[in-house]
Image: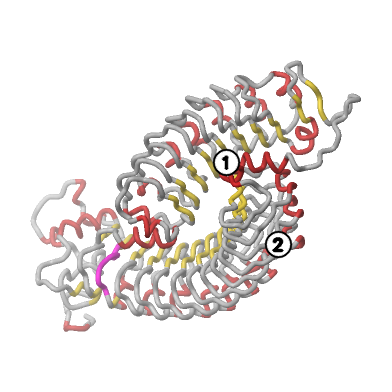
Amino acid sequence: MSRFKGGCKDSLAGFKVQTSEPTVPYGLLKAARKSGQLNLSSRGLKEVTCGSVPQNVFRLNIDTPEEAQQNVSFGAADRWWEQTDLTKLLLSSNQITLLSDDIRLLSGLTTLDLHDNQLSSLPSALGELQNLQQLRLSHNQLHSLPVEMCTLKNLRSLTLQQNLLENLPEDLGQLVNLTELDVSSNQLKSLPSSFGGLVSLQKVNLCHNQLSGLPDSLARLTNVKLLDCSDNQLTEIPASLSEMLALEQLYLRHNKLRLLPKLPAPALKELYVGNNQIEQLQTEQLSCLSAISLLELRNNKIKIVPEEITLLSTLTRLDLTNNDITSLPASLSLLPNLNVLLLEGNPLRGIRRDILSKGTGELLKYLRGRVKEEPEKTDGGDTAMMLPSQARVNVHDIKTLKLLAYSDKQAGSIPEELFDAAADQSIATVNFSKNQLTSVPPRLLEFQSSLSEINLGFNRLISCSPDICKLLQLTHIDLRNNQLSDLPSEIQNLTKLRSIILIYNRFKSFPDVLYETLSLETILLANNQVCEVDPSRLMKLTHLSTLDLANNDLLNIPPELGLCTSLRCLSLEGNPFRTPRAAIVAKGTDALMEYLRSRIPT
């Protein structure tokens, strides 16, 4: 029999702990043989090696269990000979400084969780766990990674944030099945040239490092949907990023960019370039953003918003907070989908402060009043037509923009003639805001094959009809400023829904159905009466990047909310909780999330 450190003869591995009592109850080991899962998190373990009790953890599926030595009969639940290989080993939140090579004995592992320990190195034997799919190593003290890790061909998820890594193995590109990589909050100054070999990647987090450039090989990552390069030393972005055909979200905050990147990435919907040194927006760069929905430019040095901003016809949210803008082009109001425009902290002239304080709708209405409009045809042309109700229908909007608008009429119902005018048109956007509607117009179902955005804000809706959930193409729902206190459970059927706006309603709790609507990226629930939120359910929303719970009745912020790592913008201002303190909340999302994580009991 092989011998190991400390003279172990009867065991190939164990855990060195401070006490002489077994750290792992025998019943837990027995259950692990049946389930294939062993959770040893938060047990004060110092070392995973040979030399102390429990002596049979790594030999769990090798040695015959002691109950087999006894002269007893076995029930169906106790058939030790039917044990399963250990597939999931959780060792997080201990004080482990060393992981033994004997880890190779657990060759069936698919998940190994070692996050929140004190590991400074890893054994080369890790490369023998060829079934491994998920490896969690965040919050350790790792300076480097063994090259053998790069042979884990079945690895899907690798999380290494909050370590001391200065470089990544040159062979990293061999992990061809990796879909998620998080190396944020390390000390990386460059990426290996093989990085482009990670062709299955969908989510990449490189933020909080010291990267001064990105390799051109990133162009090969054609499946990446989210790339976070925030908080680095980037001065420019390689043009090759435009070849990342699936890229939807790009985070470049807190770098040293002087120009908006030229990124004709066809799927790019969200671009975050706040806290850089951008001074001007150029037509060439703007015209590339053909699918952009959210553009964050806050905390730069922009002086002028060019007329070419109107090229961004799909833009719904534009953040220009804290720049040097003195005036706005009236054409900004012509953006058909813009519903959030943030301008605080700019030296704007010529626009009264009371107009600015009333929000996006009033500001755009003011700017529209400054647009020189074409004279309307009165000879039967197709620019406009009159309804019997004297409500004007813009046929151009219906036919060309696929927009059906009947807004700011204070009407109790939508005229039937309006729907008639849009018959047989593939309407994509409906705006019925600022009326007196008490129910969702049933004729919206006529557009169920095409309707992607609906605005019913500023009405008198007491309930939301389940009919809206039959509009399966919806990506955006705006129900702000109504009288809603609940949502229909069928909303989870809207598998393309990306954002929902519910501010200024009467919700007393976080709507249960939103926890089940897994496609959501933005939830705005400010100015309600929400008293609690469940982080364990919120974590299921792996695409959620923006959550606004400001001005609610939250008395307690659970620290586990900090584990919702997809969040990039979390607003909690104006709630009655005492911790975290207002000073921490004011520091922004990153500081707030880090604080919450630090408060999680271990």
Does residue 18 sit above or below 465 in this rendering?
below
For mark 1, what is the residue?
A: 358
Point 73% across, 17% down: residue: 389
Estimate the spatial distance between the alpha carbons at disc 2 and disc 1, rounded to whole Å.
26 Å
Point 57% across, 23% down: residue: 437
Q: Tell me which numbered mark, 2 or 1, is placed earlier along the sequence.
A: 2
- Where residue 4 appears, as percent x and y from the top left, is 22, 82
Furthest-right residue in this view: 379
Furthest-top residue in this view: 388
Name the element at disc 2. Answer: loop
Q: Is there a contact, CB below 8 Å, between mark 2 and mark 1?
A: no
The answer to whether residue 503 of the structure is visible from this angle is yes
Name the element at disc 1. Answer: loop
Along the viewing direction, whichever of 251 and 323 lies nearer the viewer: 323
Along the viewing direction, whichever of 464 and 408 lies nearer the viewer: 408
- Where residue 565 appears, as percent x and y from the top left, is 43, 57
Query: Which residues lie in the magenta part?
Result: 90-96
- The disc at residue 281 is 2
The secondary structure that dominates the magenta segment is loop
Say which quarter of the image contains residue 250: bottom right
Q: Quadrant of the C terminus?
A: bottom left
- Where residue 131 appears, as percent x and y from the top left, is 41, 65
- Where residue 410 appears, as percent x and y from the top left, is 62, 24
Kindly identify the amino acid type of the residue bearing the numbered disc 2: Leu
The answer to whether residue 496 of the structure is visible from this angle is no
